[in-house]
Image (tube, grey):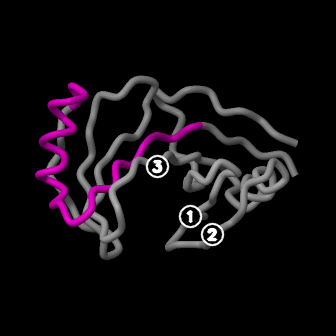
Amino acid sequence: MAHRSRLAGFIIDCQDTPADAAAAFWSAALGYRAQPAYREDGAEYADLEGAPAGLNVEVQRVAHASRVDLDIESDDIDAEADRLEKLGARRIGFVKRWWVMEAPTGHRFCIVRMRDEDGHAAANSWE
């Protein structure tokens, strides 16, 4: 089944750091505007606005070690997970509404539902 996907953005996981405090640093470091932190599904986030190509950049307060991970968005997250498994990735688990994956290189990333098209880079089409 044909589907589309593209790079959605980067999530900066910050171990035991309030999202507002983490956003203050990353906002200054990257030159993006920090938005007030918010809670969703038991997690704490703060968006950083101003990234190029409509990329989503946000900080997230986490309990695990700090790291940066990327999100790939798709109009069919299961088909995208299947495609990436054929390339050597493996599914770690389904969390809330996205797949957590691991690349053959050991990097974790997520496949999330595609957002609107406004201001975003064109998506790739896959068969």
Left or right relative to 126: residue 20: left
Query: Which numbered disc flags the more N-terminal residue, 2 or 1?
Result: 2
User: What's the distance in space between the residues labelled 2 and 1, CA to CA?
Assistant: 11 Å
Is 116 placed above or below 124 here? below
Give the image location of residue 86, x and y in percent. 85, 53
Label 3: which secondary element: strand
Q: Nearer the viewer, mark 2 or mark 1?
A: 2
Q: Which residue is denoted by mark 3 in the rendering?
A: 69
Q: Is residue 75 left or right of residue 66?
A: right
The residue under label 1 is 98
The quadrant in which residue 113 appears is bottom right
User: What x and y, as percent, mark residue 47?
Assistant: 27, 46
Q: Amino acid at mark 3?
A: Asp
Q: From mark 1 to mark 3, how far is it between C-alphas?
A: 14 Å
Q: In the image, what residue occupies the spot 58% across and 47% down?
A: 73
Q: Residue at x 46, y 25 (%)?
A: 53
Q: Give the magenta range.
A: 7-32
Total label count? 3
Front position in the image: 14 or 83: 14
In the rendered structure, which disc, 3 or 2, sits on the residue that comes first in sequence? 3
Which amino acid type is marked by label 2? Ile
Q: Which residue is mark 2?
A: 92
- Residue 51: name its quadrant: top left
